[in-house]
Image: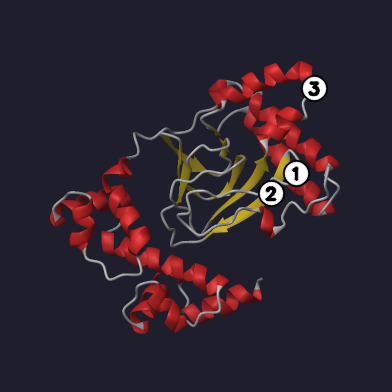
Amino acid sequence: MKSVDWFQPSRTGLAEPNTQVRNYDLSAGNTLVGLLDNPWYPPYVQDAQHVHNCMEIGMCMYGAGEIAIGDRMWTFSEGTVIVVPKNVPHAQQNRGEPLTRWRYVLINEEQYLRDTPLRSQGALSAMLRQILGGVLLDAGRPLEDVHRAIDDLFRAYDLRGATDGFEMEALARVLLARILSSPPETHRGALLSAPSRKAVEPALQFISRNYAQDMRIGELASVCAMSESYFRKVFERIMGIPPMEYLNRYRVNRSVYLLYTTNETVLSIAGLCGFASIATYNRNFMRYVGLSPGEWRKRAQSQK
């Protein structure tokens, strides 16, 4: 068992928004792949469906929103736990104020099975198949047990940091055992009707690929095979905001990513994110973030 730092950034599969494959480093050969503690801040960008190369177990610390797992969509709130096995498509739309925060535990399912005594592997395989499409836990005593198991993992890391992995591996196996043994009636949550955003999904994808270009409502309506007037109504009903406001929020959020991860000037980032002028960029950034781009960058850098 190799020594690892479970929070080491190179292990965390971080990728730009809308990346469809977000893999983690499995080279250590452990059941526990890593831990993440992720806050998100408005304005929220629509997440693209994506997959991982290991199981993702997430606990919502605070916030709210919806999460699509496979062909199902669920609401989530504080305390919700999601379990997304390897290669299961999923996407999360946050709506919490003033932010949404999740903690994640990444599990190598295949290694977990290999490390299980041979006499128990058949039963374990059957239990893993029961959650093959992913589950959402939101009620009952079993969920409380899962909460405690996740808390124990993060507490152990806080106390010991990078370790030889023995205790962390054991705690990860306890967590997964509690999830697998939870009765089906706890796998509830508020199941939404079939993802209604499918009607405007072509427009969302068009924005994610072309946000840096000049864009007209007519183009977005066209990719959805709708008239402009009908598209405006449908988009606002599904997304809760007009299409051009969604586009501006998307551009601002992409600029936040560039402000944090690059040394590009504010002027350059404004152009890279599709704003016609620095004045337009500053106005939109202030509206959605509450600070100027320069002020936000200084604050973010001071917290690195």
Look at the numbered discs 2 and 3 and tell me whether their residues touch, using CB distance below 8 Å. no
Depth check, front residue: 217 or 122: 122
Instruction: Tell me whether circle 2 and circle 1 mark residues in contact (CB < 8 Å).
Output: yes
Q: Label 1: state its secondary structure.
A: helix
Residue type, mark 2 in image: Leu
The residue that disc 2 covers is 35
Cα gap from disc 2 to disc 3, whole angstroms: 25 Å
Frontmost of labels 2 and 1 is 2
How far apart are labels 2 and 1 at the CA level? 9 Å
Residue 161 image offset from top left, x and y in percent? 81, 54
Comparing 33 with 170, the one in front is 33
Q: Quadrant of residue 220?
A: bottom left
Which residue is pictured at 65% across the width and 26% down the height?
A: 180
Reply above or below: 191 against 19. above
Is residue 232 visible in the rendered image? The answer is no
Disc 1 marks which amino acid? Leu
**Quadrant assignment, res 45:** bottom left
Q: Quick one: label 2 or label 3, which is nearer the N terminus? A: 2
Q: Is residue 280 left or right of residue 12?
A: left
Q: Nearer the viewer, mark 2 or mark 3?
A: 3
Classify 39 as above or below 32.
below
| Residue underneath mark 1 | 153
Residue 148 located left or right of residue 94? right
Q: Residue at left 22%, top 66%?
A: 216
In this rendering, does residue 50 appear at all? Answer: yes
Residue, disc 3: 117
Which callout, 2 or 1, points at the residue further toward the start of the chain? 2
The three-letter amino acid code for the residue at tag 3 is Pro
Measured in 3D between alpha carbons, the distance from the residue under mark 3 to the one under mark 1, in whole angstroms, is 23 Å
Q: Is residue 250 above or below residue 155?
A: below
Residue 155 placement (x, y as % from top left): 77, 48
